[in-house]
Every structure is written in structure tokens, then in C-alpha cells.
Amino acid sequence: MRITKRTNIAIRILMFCGVNADRLVTKAEIAERCNTSESHLAQVINRLAQLGYLHTQRGRSGGITLGRPMNEIVIGQIFRELESGVPIAECFADVDNTCPLVDACRLRLAIADAAEAFYAHLDDITLDALVCGNDELFAIFLPQACPKVG
């Protein structure tokens, strides 16, 4: 199974906001630390805000923060919501499906079941499990907190 770049970036954004839960963060900060463009971030941030995972504040002193507590942000649900429009294989596509086996294929059901098992496994993981106690993540997202030696 392949995860879209959008979902990958969404999880990075949420982890960054989780590490910086004590303040508003900017798109520029996230873009720099998460190695992505601000324009691509804007689309993902907008979607996460629509879904209630982020709160955005416009204006000069604006920024982004988590829209709910980290222990209420379930990773499986995020994946489902962001990946739902992306077909796993051609036979799952409504428009571009040219597979002649659709009505007889037993693999399609097995793939659908496997995808659901994947999401169900991620349902046991919350954002706080990814962030809390993850010193390496804090070192990446808060490098000023880790003084350089030498």
C-alpha cells in the first residue's frame, strides 16, 4: 500500500504542532522543518482545519495549532479521511477502471479487507503516541532546544 504525499505531510504537520503545542506555529516554520513547500502545506492545512484537527488563526499574529487534544487525534481516522478518494488499485476507481475482471475478481475483496486491516491497526495509534516522549522528534522540530557541541 502506498500513502499519498498529502497524508504523509498531514501527519508531519500534526506532529510538528504537537511538539509545539504551547504556541501558534507558522506555515513557514512547518515548511522548513517538514521539508515541503508552503503552497502544498496550505492545501493540507486547510483540509486538516476543515476536519477539525487544526485551528487556524489569520492575521499578523496568526498561526496554526492543534484543533483537539493529541490523545483524541486517531491516526487511522486521518488516513481514512485523507486517503478515501484515492483508489488503491485501478479496479477501485469509478472512472478509470478498465479491468475486465471486476465482477469475477476475488483479489479486489482481499485488497479491500487488507486496506481496512491497515487502517484498523492505525486506529490504535494517536498523535500523542507519536509525539510524547519522542526526543528525536523534538530534536528535529525544536533544534534551538538542543545546543550544538563544538
Image: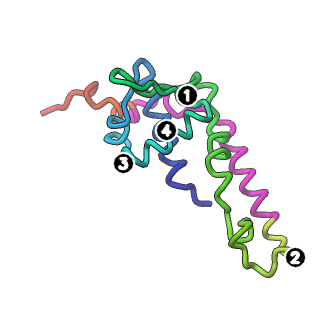
Q: Which mark is residue 128?
A: 1
Between the residue at mark 4 and the residue at mark 2, the CA separation in whole angstroms equals 41 Å
Give how far apart the Cα atoms at labels 4 and 3 are. 12 Å
Q: Quadrant of the N terminus?
A: bottom right
Against 6, residue 87 (above or below) is below
Q: Does the magenta segment cover residue 131?
A: yes
Q: Is residue 99 left or right of residue 10?
A: right
Secondary element at image label 3: loop
User: Which of marks 3 and 4 precedes in the sequence?
Assistant: 3
Q: Is residue 135 left or right of residue 90?
A: left
**Residue at (35%, 47%) from the top-left corner?**
35
Q: Amino acid at mark 3?
A: Ser
Secondary structure of the residue carrying numbered label 1: helix
Badge 4 vs badge 3, beta-carbon distance below 8 Å: no
Asked whether the residues under the numbered discs 3 and 2 touch, taking CB atoms below 8 Å apart as contact, a structural biologist would say no
Residue type, label 1: Asp
Q: Is residue 13 above or below residue 55?
A: below
Residue that carries the numbered disc 4 in the rendered image: 45
As drawn, the residue found furthest toward the front would be 59
Magenta: main secondary structure equals helix
Magenta residues, start to end: 109-137
- Give the Cα distance between marks 3 and 2: 44 Å
User: Label 4 near label 1: C-beta < 8 Å?
Assistant: no
Could you tell me the amino acid type at mark 2? Ala
Q: Which quadrant of the structure image shows residue 30?
A: top left
Q: For mark 2, what is the residue?
A: 104
Q: Does label 1 or label 4 sit earlier along the sequence?
A: 4
For mark 1, does the 10 Å Cα neighbourhood hold few (<14), some (14 to 19), or many (20 or more) residues?
some
